[in-house]
Image: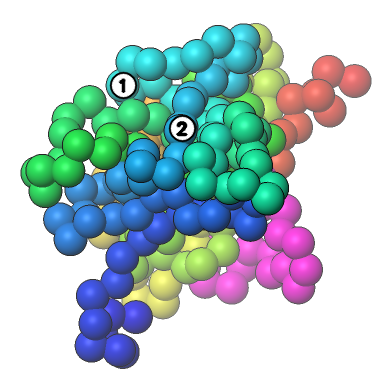
Amino acid sequence: MEEAFGAKAYDHSGATEIGAWSYECRHQPFGMHVNEAMFLVEIEDLETGEPITEPGKKGKMVITALDRMAQPCIRFDSKDVIQWDPDPCVCGRTFRVIKGGVIGRADDMTKVKGVLLSPAAVEAVVRSFDGLGDEYELVVERPGDVDHITLKVELQTGVDRSQVEPGLRDQLRLKTNLGYDIQFFEYGSLPRYKLKARRFKDLRKQNKT
């Protein structure tokens, strides 16, 4: 987009019910500032609902729009998963930063090996590698007592797996704190979806029956 339009692109996040509540500054600190002049953002534990105040812990965003009068939103359950950045932004603004932006959706999160996994985080990693295709498949199984995660990805024509596998494993571990059985396929081998994609499959319940 930046190359096509000759302009710098910035990220922001918002919702119809509450408006645009966050934005990237010009330093783009791998995250977004919360517009705390107009919004009160709280983070709740995904399981207990207890408030999270410490940085680096993921939780569900609950937001209050301070400027809405005709249709006030008080502690609106956005279902967006975010975390506070422990470091202030170098731009000098005192508005807090959510690290990595919106990480995922609470209704998509699932616990794997005791760790909360966001399929959206895996998708972001896969799509960040130029040597991989757009399609992928993420499968969680429990063949025994331990969860097993398989990630199926496609290689672009002419790309060798050795060119992307080490970096892909490192980024997955960094972004999700989990290890994966990565399987590589030829470009065009994985299913294509015309309507709603089903790239994430949790088969653990099926394995119990």
Residue 92, by quadrant, is top left
Residue wearing tag 2: 41
Does label 2 or label 1 sit earlier along the sequence? 2
Q: Secondary structure at mark 1?
A: loop
Residue wearing tag 1: 55
Q: Does the segment drawn in magenta span residue 192?
A: yes
Residue 82: x and y, percent?
45, 34
Residue 130: x and y, percent?
33, 68
Is residue 36 or residue 183 the one in the foreground? 36
Image height of 16 relative to 36, above or below: below
Please name the predominant secondary structure of the magenta segment in the image: loop
Amino acid, disc 1: Pro
Label 1 crowding class (10 Å Cα cut-off): few <14, some 14-19, many 20+? some
Is residue 27 or residue 130 the one in the foreground? 27
Amino acid, disc 2: Val
Image height of 158 relative to 198, above or below: below
Where does the C terminus fall, quadrant-wise?
A: top right
